[in-house]
Amino acid sequence: MSDKWIIEQAQKGMITPFENAQKREGIISYGVSSYGYDARVAPEFKIFTNVDSAIVDPKNFSPNSFVERETDVCIIPPNSFALGRTVEYFKVPRDVLVICLGKSTYARCGIIVNVTPLEPEWEGHVTLEFSNTTPLPAKIYANEGVCQFLFFKGDQECLTSYKDRAGKYMGQTGVTLPKL
């Protein structure tokens, strides 16, 4: 969907807070673009650590696998990852699916941003995964752009939305770990 549609939906509460123009002076850009919205990462991070020799198990995830940091710059160890969350809170309309892609500035540094699709009628802060694919430590800058959300409007409303099925990540407000 276009910037015009994104701005109209943001005025109805789809994205809060919302920047209706690209902010880019001396920072990694964020705000509305021609056909997307570049979101920021909040200064709240969970950085993967293997101090306790934990096993990563999506069915029984141990919070001991992370150290928590509130900081303006997150340092991700080599070949590791961190979790963050968007500054923006999203409320997805019932007839829209949202896809997220990492910004090229980070991708060109070997930092991959991963987010699963935001389903119709999902809402919350988006948990972001940052993978450092390099053999060197990598920086993520809080309150700057890290990813772009693209909005796809369906030709009709879905029969069952994320809200209808009471999805387990509905309304999340912080960095959210895996749930079963």
Image (cartoon, rainbow, N blue to C red):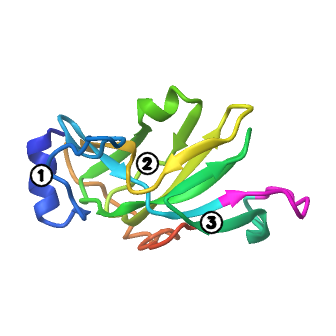
Residue occupied by mark 1: 7
Q: Residue 3 in the image: state x and y as whole percent.
A: 14, 41
Q: Nearer the viewer, residue 23 or 163?
A: 23
Q: Residue 147 in the image: state x and y as whole percent.
A: 40, 43
- Identify the residue at image location x=65%, y=68%: 68
Q: Nearer the viewer, mark 1 or mark 2?
A: 1
Q: Amino acid at mark 3?
A: Leu
Which of the 4 image quarters holds residue 80? top right
CA neighbours of label 3 inside 10 A, class few (<14), some (14 to 19), many (20+) = some
Q: Check residue 51 for magenta coloring.
A: yes
Q: CA distance from mark 3 to mark 2?
A: 16 Å
If the image is split into quadrants, where does the N terminus sit? top left
Residue occupied by mark 3: 177
Q: Amino acid at mark 2?
A: Pro
- Report the magenta residues as a range: 47-57
Q: Nearer the viewer, mark 3 or mark 2?
A: 3
Q: Nearer the viewer, residue 148 or 69?
A: 69
Report the residue that reaches farthest toward the right: 53
Mark 3 and mark 1 lie on one chain; the one further toward the N terminus is 1
* Residue 161 seen by the camera: no
- Identify the residue at image location x=63%, y=50%: 75
Horizontal side, residue 57 vs residue 88: left or right: right
Mark 3 residue element: loop
CA neighbours of label 2 inside 10 A, class few (<14), some (14 to 19), many (20+) = some
Residue occupied by mark 2: 117
- Identify the residue at image location x=61%, y=67%: 69
Mark 1 residue element: helix
Mark 3 and mark 2 lie on one chain; the one further toward the N terminus is 2
Q: Amino acid at mark 1?
A: Ile
Q: Is residue 129 above or below residue 109?
A: below
